[in-house]
Image (tube, rainbow, N blue to C red):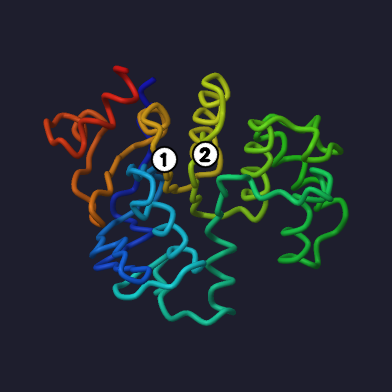
Amino acid sequence: MEKAKSHIDYNDTVITIRGLRKSFGSQHVLRGVDLDLYQGENLVVLGRSGTGKSVLIKIICGLLTADQGSVKVLGKEVIGMKDKELDYIRINVGFSFQNSALYDSMTVRKNLEFPLVRNQPNLTRAEINREVEEKLDAVGLLQAINQMPAELSGGQRKRIGIARTLILQPQIMLYDEPTAGLDPITCIEINELINEVQERFKTSSIIITHDLTCAKSTGDRIVILLEGQFQRQGSFEEVFDTDDARVKPFYDYNFIQ
């Protein structure tokens, strides 16, 4: 399914990355990455496992430290930030983890309340309830508010994870393999939800995936990470209109085999 055209402000860059490098010992993962994310844009980063896709978004929100380069998020340089400054970034940049990262000992309600109360301690009970219910309604799971994570399907846990990420009203969303491990129908539902979040909450997003259906359905622009650098970018058709032996197998595996 092709993605509908989004309202993107190309004059407003919310993430700017220049010359980003990251190695783990002798393994050089990112070798001088340059990237811009624009206001209102869903940007998909494609690449094989182990190519540094998840490393990239962990550096963006300060979970990993870069070896070299510049990462500006909402106009602020992340590299070298102190913990207190990183708190500002992490409130405004929502990270949707691959495994949803829900607390198994808490109900769905408590999972959403936890970051809200921690970061906005002056909220009233009525305000907390309203925020929790609004975000659960946005992902279509208000009825699961009193359930435990173990009672939910994989797709439902993904949705609750996204709802919890939205609870602090971030300006930017980072999705790490949002459709991994899900059946095809649930994948379609998650792809639709990512687009709904973009439209309803006016977010800008980076979506890490190797699922080309997800990329085609959610990406306003697609970049492909090869050998530690972005080798191709553009629309889905522009990226895969090539005989490059490093790129063509992605398309063949997803749509031909």
Residue 53 badge: none
Can you give x and y, in whole percent of width and height, for residue 64 in the image? 47, 68
Q: How many marks?
A: 2
Q: Residue at 65% x, 44% y: name it.
A: 161
The kind of residue tagged 1 is Thr
The tag earlier along the polypeptide, 2 or 1, is 2
Q: Residue at x 29, y 68 (%)?
A: 21
Q: Are marks 2 and 1 in contact (CB under 8 Å)?
A: yes
Mark 1 crowd level (few <14, some 14–19, many ≥20, 10 Å Cα): many
Say which of 186 and 123 sits in front. Answer: 186
Quarter of the image for residue 215 reads: top left
Where residue 226 sits in the image (x, y, percent)? 24, 49
Q: Is residue 57 above or below residue 119?
A: above
Which residue is outermost to the front? 26
Is 228 on the left or on the right of 129, as rendered?
left
The structure residue drawn at horizontal position 22% and vertical position 28%, both measured from the top left corner, is: 237
List x then y, in percent, for residue 211: 40, 32
**Separation (CA) of disc 2 from disc 1:** 7 Å
Q: Amino acid at mark 2?
A: Pro
- Where disc 2 sits, the SS reads loop
Q: What residue is pinned by disc 1?
A: 209
Left or right: residue 75 versus residue 87 is: left
Mark 2: few, some, or many residues within 10 Å (few <14, many ≥20)? many
Give the residue at mark 2.
178
Mark 1: which secondary structure?
A: strand
